[in-house]
Image: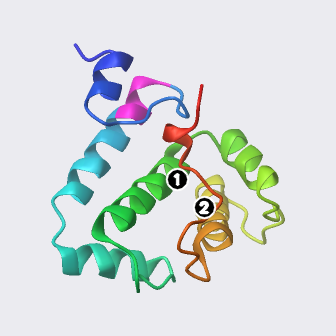
Amino acid sequence: ALTWETFEANGVWVGSVAGLSAAWRIHAEFEVIKKLSPVDVRARYEQIGLSPQNLLRQQLLERLKQVVVWLIMPIAGLEQVCREHGVSLATATQGNEERQETLAMRLAHRLWDGQRVAPPWQPSWQQPQ
């Protein structure tokens, strides 16, 4: 049986999610991301609406993983992260899943649009506890 510690040891950041089901979803998505070719990593990043120009593959992978966490974490946690970064919570979407995706994409654009080489942002799984 996998425990929270096992997920963390395998590189799955579970601190932001509630429950093993969400941790499994993140784990599965991380496995898919890890196996992407460099071209596919760039394409997936472009699907978010951001330019991968001047970013290393590892930076793109970390950002894609962060988006996965935002899409799976409880909506209240995502809203808190959005508030911390000045991202508007107002959405025209009604369903929670659509709202979560809208907020995650807004947050990604807030943090990474404009290609700052050394952004002041630090991934949530790397922040001091």
**Image coords of residue 109 (percent x, y):** 62, 74
Task: Tell whether 87 sits left or right of 113.
Answer: right
Disc 1 secondary structure class: helix
Considering the image in quadrants, where does the C terminus appear?
Answer: top right
Depth order, front residue of 11/74: 11
Q: Position of residue 119 (x, y in %)?
A: 60, 65
Q: Which mark is residue 71?
A: 1
Neighbor class of circle 1 (other Cα within 10 Å; few <14, some 14-19, many 20+) is many
Relative to residue 111, is residue 124 depicted above or below?
above
Query: Where does the N terminus fall, quadrant-wise?
Result: top left
Q: In the rendered structure, are the residues bearing label 2 and label 1 in contact, judged by CB atoms less than 8 Å apart?
A: yes
Residue positioned 58% across, 56% down in the render: 97
Look at the magenta stretch and give its main secondary structure: helix
* Residue type for callout 2: Ala
Q: Which mark is residue 119?
A: none
Q: CA distance from mark 2 to mark 1?
A: 6 Å
* x, y percent for residue 10: 25, 31
- Mark found first going from the N terminus, 2 or 1: 1
Front residue of this view, candidates 57 and 66: 57
Q: Out of 58 and 71, give the one closest to the viewer.
A: 58
Q: Start and end of the magenta stretch?
A: 19-23
Quarter-wise, where is residue 65 in the image?
bottom left
